[in-house]
Amino acid sequence: MRLSGNFSLDEFLVSQTAERKGGEILQHQMNPPQQVIDNMQYLVDETVQPLRTLLGVPMKISSGYRCEELNTAIGGSNRSQHVHGQAADIILSDRMIYELASERTRRVIENKGREIIRQSWRPGINANFYLFAVTCMYLDDLDVDQVIHEYGTPGEPAWVHVSASRERNRRQILRIDRDGSKELTLEEALALGG
């Protein structure tokens, strides 16, 4: 089932842990209730596909929906929006950094970031940081409940968590690392690349 021009439902269901465990976990993971599918459709329509279109490069969903059993098995939060199909962890293709076709998009994002924090980003930020930064900068234009710079180092997140929900829209920017989580302002978020 296609959720958009660039994303399929299967991309939001795949889980190596569920595949490894098999049985009921895999069965529940691959057959989400209709409400969860509706929530994933909303997430894609309002947040993920607009980001993909804006950036113009492939994105990989490293974790989308998690059935309750899977969420427990991986030690996920019992309040995780993944359980409701309202969140995705995304990895942006490094093509964003290297391809000439992406240069204009990178420059636009870098210039907008420089206008906000009055400094340039350092060399070596990763593609995921561009995804994080652009999500933060367009927070008011997208339906984003949370955008999270997860693990990695400042300016080089291991992945970017985005969530969207019809019920709440906190427009919250966070950074999570092994020391815990911290809410950030737009300026603090963009300064992670400085």
Image (cartoon, rainbow, N blue to C red):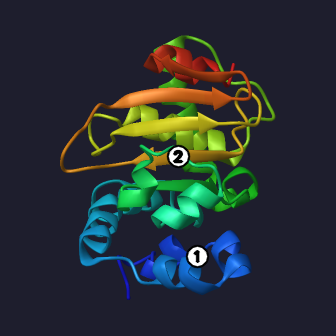
Residue 172 to residue 188: above or below: below
Position of the C terminus by quadrant: top right
Looking at the rendered structure, which numbered label has been put on residue 34? none
Is 78 displayed left or right of 159 in the figure?
left
Looking at the picture, how far across and down is residue 152, in whole percent? 76, 36
Q: Which residue is mark 2?
A: 161
Is there any visible trace of residue 8 in the rendered image?
no
Looking at the picture, how far across and down is residue 60, in whole percent? 61, 65
Of residues 132 and 19, the one nearer the viewer is: 19
Q: Secondary structure at mark 1?
A: loop
Name the residue located 61 percent from the left edge and 86 percent from the top edge: 23
Of residues 122 and 145, the one nearer the viewer is: 145
Please tell me how crowded label 1 is: few (under 14), some (14-19), or many (20+) other residues with Cα within 10 Å. some
Picture quadrant where residue 160 is located: top right
Q: Secondary structure at mark 2?
A: strand
Is 89 displayed left or right of 165 in the figure?
right
Position of the N terminus by quadrant: bottom left
Name the residue located 54 percent from the left edge and 15 percent from the top edge: 188
Picture quadrant where residue 58 is located: bottom right
Q: Which residue is mark 1?
A: 14
Is 163 displayed left or right of 165 in the figure?
right
